[in-house]
Image (tube, grey):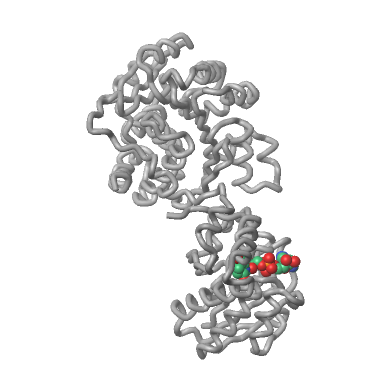
Amino acid sequence: MRNELLSPAEMAEADRLAIAAGPLDGYGLMQRAGEAVAAIVLARYPGAMRVHVLCGPGNNGGDGYVVARLLAEAGVDVALWASGEPRTGSDAALAAADCTLERHPLSAFTAEAGSLVVDAIYGAGLSKPLSGDAKGAVDIVTGMNLPVVAIDLPSGVSDDSGEVLGSAFRAVVTVTFARKKPGHLLLPGRERCGEIVLADIGIREEIIDQVAPRTFENRPGLWIATFPAPAVDAHKYKRGHTSVFSGGPSATGAARLSALAAARSGAGAVTVLSPANAMHVNAAHLTSIMLRKVDAVEDVHDLIGDRRPSSFVLGPGFGIGDKARDFTLAMLAKNRQDGAVEGLVLDADGITSFRNATATLFEAAGRPDAPALIMTPHEGEFGRLFADIAADTALSKLAKAREAARRASAVIVYKGADSVIASPDGRAAINGNGAPWLATAGSGDVLAGIIAGLLAQGMPAFEAACAGVWIHAEAGSRFGPGLIAEDLPLAIVPVLRELTGSAAR
Ligand SMILES: NC(=O)C1=CN([C@@H]2O[C@H](COP(=O)(O)OP(=O)(O)OC[C@H]3O[C@@H](n4cnc5c(N)ncnc54)[C@H](O)[C@@H]3O)[C@@H](O)[C@H]2O)[C@H](O)CC1
Ligand SMILES: [K+]
């Protein structure tokens, strides 16, 4: 499955390469785009009394002129509303010339109940907040609650960031071309798109390969090739050993949630590392999961020497301070080559502990052969480590995660309803299968555990993080109402079963 997302620049490049390679020229691509949208309208709304096609001045409007012409040719009652004149010689001007329907100014737009709107005002070229006639049309359509089919993107949604510039349509269906764009998945854009239909307009796979996009929709196709399946001769340590640091006596539950999730995700052995004063509390609640006392940094070294855990989780319920920093740096100082530590998932208090010591953390993570560092900040934690990036309003969530990953030499899982996973090598993925049920206490602890469990089984850090986010979201979405974090480790099992089936194929 192809999961690439195209930035506006990459889409323009694909466009240019496709036109250069032929056989379609720019107007040919536009006609294919218009045909795809008209087919959706006819299939989905066969009974629409009237279709209002709203055309802007650019090529998005050009697609709209094609749609208006094709719908009228199919016998639909079409009203055509135009905002601005296409530039002379543009593909949009050709499309407008081929569409002989009477054109009304968008500033005079009115509609009737029972009609449908095709939004072709702005697409990839949106450059500023909607105003004037475009904003007026959004207000009327939204006020009347008319169904909208958006071409490429609902006008007002940025394809780069998913931001709503001023105001935007809320579409029932958005038809986009060649590949989805980040704005289809990032919030609030995702909510404005409705169902997204991807139409093939003749931009071939080789063209996309030439553009070599580095942004992806987070779906199994992105990482299934590295998804672990136990070998026939598996024994427990061969399936990976994950260790999870516990907090003190009154903060042990988070680590156990992580540990359970790591075990469910397939790590053959999992150990909770507990301070001496919390050993009894932890022991009372653990069965298959092992327990070991770890109070000082020497204990961390001993553990790594003796038991060779391949991945760690530090942060959930751990407490903020020197101990978190010392333990983290001790792990990052190990060499991956020795087969010692593959990686560390730093979450919650583990992240916050470095708010005034970011350079030390980033340097340790950037050392060649250091274990992989995966950080899983939500918005607040992200701002603690990357205050300047967080405050930069010119950057999308995608760009923020990417810049943070590069700076920290870490895989960053920037959590939220539209989690972004970014790798220091420049790859990034946007997650789209989340559900509000996942916003529950302890949910993040489970996510950290799943990622660490996958890491322990040899999955590369970026893929493990992507897979962890997707599996966690899928389990939560399928479970639905009533979900609490305790349910999640078991709820991932059916998801894992399906994935293991597809990995074996
Ligand atoms: N890429 C492809 O393969 C294909 C894309 N198609 C369609 O083309 C649009 C992108 O067209 P473009 O002309 O670049 O941009 P727009 O039509 O979105 O915008 C036109 C123009 O409008 C001005 N503008 C933008 N925002 C505002 C605003 N808020 N207020 C006032 N004016 C604004 C600005 O000058 C823009 O340049 C893409 O989305 C597809 O639908 C093809 O037809 C098929 C192939
Ligand atoms: K549009």
Judging depth in this view, the residue of 169 and 285 nearest the camera is 169
Residue 261 position in % (x across, y down): 35, 34
Residue 487 position in % (x across, y down): 33, 41
The residue depicted at 55 percent of the width and 48 percent of the height is 215
Residue 199 position in % (x across, y down): 50, 67
Relative horizontal placement of residue 195, taking residue 52 as reference (left or right): left
Judging depth in this view, the residue of 439 and 419 nearest the camera is 419
Can residue 154 be spotted in the picture? no
Please determine whether, in this image, residue 456 is positioned above or below residue 432.
above
Judging depth in this view, the residue of 483 and 166 nearest the camera is 166
Relative horizontal placement of residue 427, taking residue 301 as reference (left or right): right
Relative horizontal placement of residue 274, taking residue 17 as reference (left or right): left
Residue 115 position in % (x across, y down): 54, 82
**Quarter of the render that holds ligand 1:** bottom right
Please determine whether, in this image, residue 280 is positioned above or below residue 288.
above
The residue depicted at 51 percent of the width and 29 percent of the height is 373
